[in-house]
């Protein structure tokens, strides 16, 4: 899938709150550091993971699924296998009235679920990472393409 820089930039600028489905509590997992990065950039993060429900992450309580979200969410960022996407998209369309974007992480795509969301007026981005796109589009990408703010090597 090809997305224009203008489209990606618009999505990232208009988005205020992100439900991160499949977020991990482990700081070395991509879902953790992407959610952390987005929270540091001012996005309100709603962590979603049934295995960690009730715990706190980035100042928010982890919920089991999208039905437990009580505040407005305009983007769902999916860190789940592609075969789990249709049910997540269906639930998001049912319970998130302010939903404007479904974002599927690198390696995650599902054309039927994308078509369903688009038919409901929701923008869809597949097989991309909002952290990488934010860094690339807003001048934060450094040598090698990494700027996590986390040092994981030990001397």
Image (cartoon, rainbow, N blue to C red):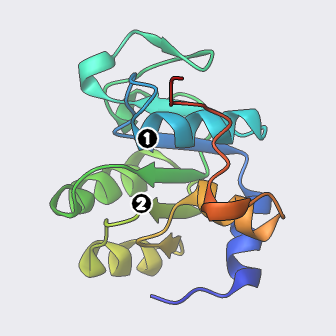
* Tag 2 residue: 105
Q: Residue at x 69, y 67 (%)?
A: 11
Instruction: Give the percent coordinates (x, y) of residue 106.
Output: 40, 64
Task: Determine the secondary structure under disc 1.
Answer: helix
Q: Residue 54's mark?
A: none
Picture residue at 53% right of the left edge, 37% below the top: 33
> Would residue 119 be found to the left or right of residue 137 on screen?
left
Name the residue located 79 percent from the left edge and 60 percent from the top edge. 13
- Mark 2: which secondary structure? loop
Q: Badge 2: how crowded within 10 Å, few (<14), some, or many (20+)?
A: many
Query: Picture quarter containing residue 83?
Result: bottom left
Q: In the displayed orientation, state which residue is furthest to the top.
A: 55
Q: Is residue 20 left or right of residue 67?
A: right
State if disc 1 and disc 2 touch (CB < 8 Å): yes
Q: Using the image, determine if residue 13 lies above or below residue 17.
A: below
Of 74 and 83, nearer the camera is 83
Mark 1 residue crowding within 10 angstroms, few (<14) / some (14–19) / many (20+):
many
Q: Residue at x 55, y 43 (%)?
A: 34
Q: Position of residue 136 (x, y in %)?
A: 72, 68
**Residue 41: quarter of image:** top right
Vertical order, 127 against 57 (above or below): below
Answer with left or right where residue 35 lies relative to residue 51: right
Report, in whole angstroms, how far the alpha carbon at label 2 lies from the one at label 1.
Answer: 9 Å
| Towards the viewer: 62 or 32 | 32
- Farthest residue, direction right: 139
Expressed as whole percent of the image width and height from the top left, the position of residue 151 reads 60, 31
Q: Does 38 appear above or below 92? A: above
104 and 72: which is toward the camera: 104
Which residue position is annotated with label 1? 31
Q: Is residue 4 above or below residue 15?
A: below
Of the two numbered discs 2 and 1 on the same chain, state the one appearing first in sequence.
1
């Amino acid at each position: 899938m090809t997305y224009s820089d203008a489209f990606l930039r618009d999505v990232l600028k208009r988005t205020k709150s992100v439900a991160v489905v499949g977020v991990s509590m482990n700081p070395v997992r991509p879902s953790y550091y992407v959610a952390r990065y987005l929270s540091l950039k001012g996005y309100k993060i709603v962590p979603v993971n049934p295995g960690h429900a009730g715990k706190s992450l980035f100042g928010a309580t982890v919920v089991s699924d999208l039905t437990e979200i009580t505040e407005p969410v305009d983007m769902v960022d999916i860190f789940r296998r592609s075969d789990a996407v249709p049910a997540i998209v269906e639930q998001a369309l049912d319970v998130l009235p302010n939903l404007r974007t479904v974002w599927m992480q690198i390696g995650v795509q599902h054309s039927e679920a994308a078509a369903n969301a688009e038919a409901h007026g929701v923008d869809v981005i597949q097989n991309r990472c909002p952290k990488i796109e934010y860094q690339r589009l807003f001048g934060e990408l450094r040598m090698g393409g990494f700027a996590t703010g986390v040092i994981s090597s030990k001397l």
